[in-house]
Image (tube, helix red, strand yellow):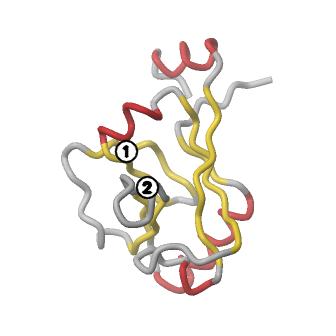
Amino acid sequence: MAMDTRKVVATEAALTLIEKLKSLHGPLMFHQSGGCCDGSAPMCYPLGEFKVGTRDVYLGDIGGCPFYMSESQYAYWRHTQLIIDVVPGRGSGFSLESPEGLRFLTRSRAFTDEEWNAVERGES
């Protein structure tokens, strides 16, 4: 069985919502918020609407959309795979899924030692 060492992945429910949001808003991007107003939530924006900082870390794409996290928050999550999911409820007023009655949610799992070694070698 092949290892999945991507830093960020999305559930089928999240991918379905991403496709809907792309049809409504065009290309999208995600940024894992740092905990200010909305706790620590994956925020969805039209591509380029959120200014990515020099200290933000690109983790990969979900549904064809880039996903970023602040460097300081990444220090805590670096040994995990982020799993972006969707649950009922209202997310942030700033995140595009809010009017849909759904919100993106980050789940995670720790990489195994073997997976982490592959991550460190740059394999995915």
Q: Secondary structure at mark 2?
A: strand
Q: Secondary structure at mark 1?
A: strand
Are discs 2 and 1 less than 8 Å apart at CB?
yes
Residue that extends furthest to the left in the rendered view of this protein: 54
Left/right placement of residue 59 relative to residue 50 reads: right
- Note whether 33 is above or below 101 in the view shown: above
- Note whether 38 is above or below 7 in the view shown: below
Q: Quadrant of residue 75?
A: top left
Mark 2 and mark 1: span between their CA atoms? 7 Å
Residue beneath the point at 62% across and 79% down: 20
Q: Quadrant of the C terminus?
A: top right
Give whichever of discs 2 and 1 has the lower sequence position.
1
Q: Quadrant of residue 116?
A: top right
- Residue 1 pos. (x, y %): 80, 23
- Residue 32 pos. (x, y %): 43, 54
- Residue 111 pos. (x, y %): 61, 24
Amino acid type at mark 2: Pro
Residue that extends furthest to the right in the rendered view of this protein: 1
The numbered disc on residue 103 is none
Which residue, given by chain and number where applicable, does mark 2 sit on? 66
Which residue, given by chain and number where applicable, does mark 1 sit on? 58
- Give neighbour class at mark 2: few <14, some 14-19, many 20+ (Cα, 10 Å): some
Residue beneath the point at 45% across and 30% down: 78
